[in-house]
Image (cartoon, rainbow, N blue to C red):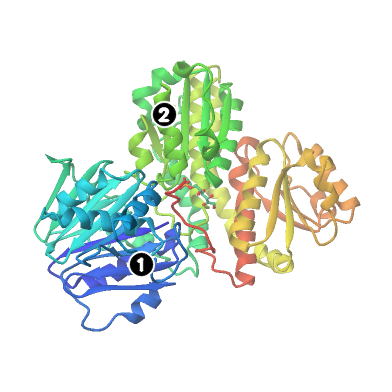
Amino acid sequence: MCGIVGYIGKKNATPILMQGLRALEYRGYDSAGLYVAGKGVLKRAGKVDVLAAAIPKEFSGNAGIAHTRWATHGPPTEKNAHPHTDTSRTIWVVHNGIVENYAELREAMIQRGTTFESDTDTEVLAKLIGEEYGMGVVLEDAVTRALKKINGTYALAVMSEREPDKIVAARLGSPLLIGIANDAYFLASDATPILPHTRRVIYLDDGELSILSPNACMVRREFETLSKKIEVLEWDAETAKKQGHEHFMLKEIMEIPEVIKNTLRGRLDFNEGTSVLSGLQNVASRLANIQRIIITGCGSAYYAGLAGKNLIEEFSGVPVEVEIASELRYRRFTGDSKHSILLAVSQSGETADTLEAIRIAKRHGMLTLGIVNVVGSSIARETDAGVYNHAGPEISVASTKGFISQIIVLALIALMLGRQRSLQKAKGRGLARFLSELPEKVSEILGRKDMVAEVAKRYASMQNALCIGRKFQYPVAFEGALKLKEVAYLHAEGYGAGEMKHGPLALIESSVPTIALLPMDSVYEKTRSNVEEIRARGGKVIAVTTEGNEAAARLADDVLFVPTTHEAFLPVLTVIPLQLFTYYIAKERGLPIDKPRNLAKSVTVE
Ligand code: F6R
């Protein structure tokens, strides 16, 4: 979604801001713009490259702010792109988030004679700040006063032509961090634009405002100055690059063995047959007594949650409900809050609905835990405790390694909860061993990726597909269908294999292939029957099954094999051929794999 970059220091801000905008492209956007002190503003609809081509040589200065916009209020046009300005064209504002009361504020301003150039809520905010600034206060005070008048969420950066050596930034509900280098300060919505320059950062918290100048950075809440902790980012800029792969999606799939190792590192106790999760140590005794878990998340994170439900119920017997965060936040919370926990799953740690579900659960007195990849993100900071994925930066909009690392963390939590209850040590030891063997097994699957590419070529022109699975494979069916929709732009439905007879079987014909998740697990025979029913009705079948299943070649039109493991951990393996299959279909179709149309990596609005 929208991205902010800012720079103030001794160097030319323009190339730094443009590099920052490029680093933020992965979040999804449809227009871009920048303001450079002393030079003015430039905006363009479309890609950052279009903006770059419009920048004249002399467009340089030592401070500036820039933005990628993902349209919410008004179409993705040049006039709606940020920065926006006040009536006297003195201040410039870039903003992420939504001003909920913008329509009434705008109406009141129009009554006062103000005219607007754009359809955006941000312009209303810029004009509000401008009105306060017109009273003769300094920029930070004008921003503080204006923000009191709005409802909604924001991360914003503001500059004024009257005070060119200053950037004012503020946050409520949308992430913003400050990078600290020896001779400069940076501002960004996430760490990627900052990483090439420095790893020392300050995270702004909700309600905080920062004043950056070339040699100082001050953070305050209302008018009180705060002393903020400087944190050091774990990721480096190199990790976030493609490393020779054509797309981030493939690079991130190829990283999965390493990611699983990193997610597991130091967290398996083979002797005790359990997991050691330092992020949950403070709440371990509460976890031993919980009677219900609600897992929440959106998209792939929600499907990882479904996989987590199976793992937690299987190993620990603790009942688990899984709810999409955008629904959970509007539902009535029922049951005993004291003995329930909310477990929020989010790669970015910024998903607005997931964050809101956490806040509501907290208000109901529930313990909230996070499974988050981005260190220091809002969800990581707002949950009571949690476990980091350690999956490294995920740049491709479609989650692949992030999804797998979420399942691995959920497996570790399931193991810990199980061992706190009736799961026997010997069984726990066996499960720990199965988990530790997964990286090697994933490498075997990845070693056969060209075979998946061959199969994908044969199906590249399909328009519709079904993905079916049962028990542990049920969430994989949904995740596989989601990948096909978002990356390959084809209509795919995930279904429980047993549901085929209750409707979807009517869709079956030779042009609607079914991807059947058919490993040799405890429900193999049941799913095999469903596959036979599909074949009997003229449907094509691509089976994802375990090695050694010779019958699969007779049963299906195409077969993709994965190694065997404990059936509860098979989703980690069976989803990988689906990720690769999607990737190669999208490649055949010439689609923008890493940045699918209309989608954003970090969904910071509800
Ligand atoms: C799908 C995908 C999305 C995200 C969802 C949640 O490939 O990437 O469905 O899983 O937007 O995002 P996070 O995990 O950042 O909360």
Foreground pick, 344 / 164 = 164
Q: Position of residue 278 (x, y in %)?
A: 35, 31
Query: How many residues crowd around disc 1 within 10 Å: few (fewer than 14), some, or many (20 or more)?
Result: few
Give the residue drawn at x 46%, y 55%.
601
Q: Nearer the viewer, residue 212 or 569?
A: 212
What amino acid is found at the position of numbered circle 1 in the picture?
Glu
Q: Nearer the viewer, residue 47 or 387?
A: 47
Left or right of residue 144, residue 438 in this image: right
Secondary structure at numbered mark 1: loop
Identified by mark 2, the residue type is: Thr
Residue 30 horizontal/vertical position (percent): 45, 66
Left or right of 548 in this view: 293:
left
Name the spot of residue 52 as percent of width and height, x first: 34, 77
Q: Which mark is residue 448?
A: none
Count how many numbered circles sit on residues in the image: 2
**For numbered disc 2, what is the local secondary structure?**
strand
Q: Earlier in the sequence, mark 1 or mark 2?
A: 1
Relative to 4, is 296 above or below? above
Left or right: where 438 falls relative to 35:
right
Viewport quadrant of the N terminus: bottom left
The answer to which image quadrant residue 179 occupies is: bottom left
Q: Is residue 345 visible?
A: yes
Instruction: Establish if 415 lies above or below 554.
Output: above
Tell me if I can see residue 448 in this picture.
no
State whether label 2 is within 8 Å of ligand 1. no
Question: Which labelled disc corresponds to residue 368?
Answer: 2
What's the CA distance linking mark 1 and mark 2?
43 Å
Q: Which mark is residue 117?
A: 1
Q: Is disc 1 in contact with disc 2, using a CB cutoff of under 8 Å?
A: no
